[in-house]
Amino acid sequence: MPKATMVTMIEPQAGLKSPNGSPANSHTHLHDLLTESPNDASQGFDTKSALEIARIINHEDSKVAAAVKKALPEIALVIDSVARSLREGGRLIYIGAGSSGRIASLDACECPPYFSTTPQTVQYIMAGGPKALASPVEVNEDSEELGQRDIARRRPTRKDMVIGLSSSGRTPYVVAAVAYARARGAKTACITCNSNTPLASAADIAIVAEVGPEVISGSTRMKAATAQKMITNMITTGAMTRLGYVYENLMVNVHMQNSKLVERGIGILIRACGIDRERAVDVIKSAGRSVPVALVMLKANVDKPEAVRRLTKSGGNVRLAIEDTVMDF
């Protein structure tokens, strides 16, 4: 197993190398970053009325989807890589700092209720730990050692997918963590809003959404964070769909732990199978309150044990279980 190398982003002479061995454009100076540049559209921002402020922000926000669109090929690669890792028993591990870390934590925390994943399947690492979600602990962002230490505790392997988030693309904590995971054989990717960065050089796949200068210079909790939220939504939703946890456009792997989710499960069966509510409730009960099992029972006209067998064979892919085939990707 190759040893992890310590990467340094602070000084240009540190000689950070890209995967092919060539020097990376490190954007050493913060003021050189596009996300840190002044925005002409918001000059005199502090003199504007509330409506003018809202209009300026809204106009800038309208640019985010277009920036994300340019990164769709890379996003698609990451979707399939995540799906493959999860199918092979690996994990998706996000790592970030500041606003980027909070976006990562949000996406990871929302996967269990929406797709019935476990907290171990989709994880996040936040610079400064969980307390940094509510209180700033920005000093940790500058520590390569802490980044390596925190990812090392998760023992990344070739089965795992590790995704680093950093708007600037230069956060030492995140760059070092991604480089460590890659050296340990994990598949790696990054989400950033600046091009030619150390983080892009450290990762196998770089997702770059150049949203441009923020309304308030350097406030990357705005457009940059919005882009990162859009991209993480795409990654996990896409991966879970590729795994078959979505049928048609229905969230069939929903975990029915409260009354709202129970009603959602009943509604899914009604829409997907064209049955009435009474029939949907009866089948969900007989399926052990499992929407995937109930859906396979109804669509394939089989009993619960056969539905469970098919889902096991297909790795939880509902469509393939209904057709009784095996996933191939």
Image (spheres, rainbow, N blue to C red):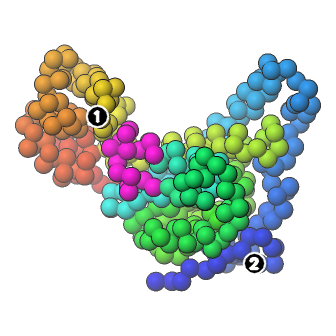
Could you tell whether 312 is left or right of 75 in the image? Answer: left
In the rendered image, residue 130, in percent from the top left (x then y), is placed at 54, 54
Q: Quadrant of residue 138?
A: bottom right
Q: Earlier in the sequence, mark 2 or mark 1?
A: 2
50 lies above or below 247: above
Q: Residues within 10 Å of mark 2 (few under 14, many from 20)?
A: some
Q: Residues within 10 Å of mark 1 (few under 14, many from 20)?
A: some
- Residue drawn 7% across and 37% down? 303
Name the residue beneath numbered marker 2: 15
- Residue drawn 68% across and 62% down? 141
Name the residue beneath numbered marker 1: 256
In the rendered image, residue 112, in percent from the top left (x then y), is placed at 37, 44
Q: Image quadrant for the C terminus?
A: bottom left
Q: Residue 185 versus residue 172: which sits nearer the camera?
A: 172
> Label 1's element?
loop
Magenta span covers which residues?
109-123
> Label 2's element?
loop
Any mark on residue 188, and which?
A: none
Q: Residue 50 versus residue 64: which sits nearer the camera?
A: 50
197 lies above or below 268: below
In the rendered image, residue 190, in percent from the top left (x then y), is placed at 59, 58
Q: Quadrant of residue 28?
A: bottom right
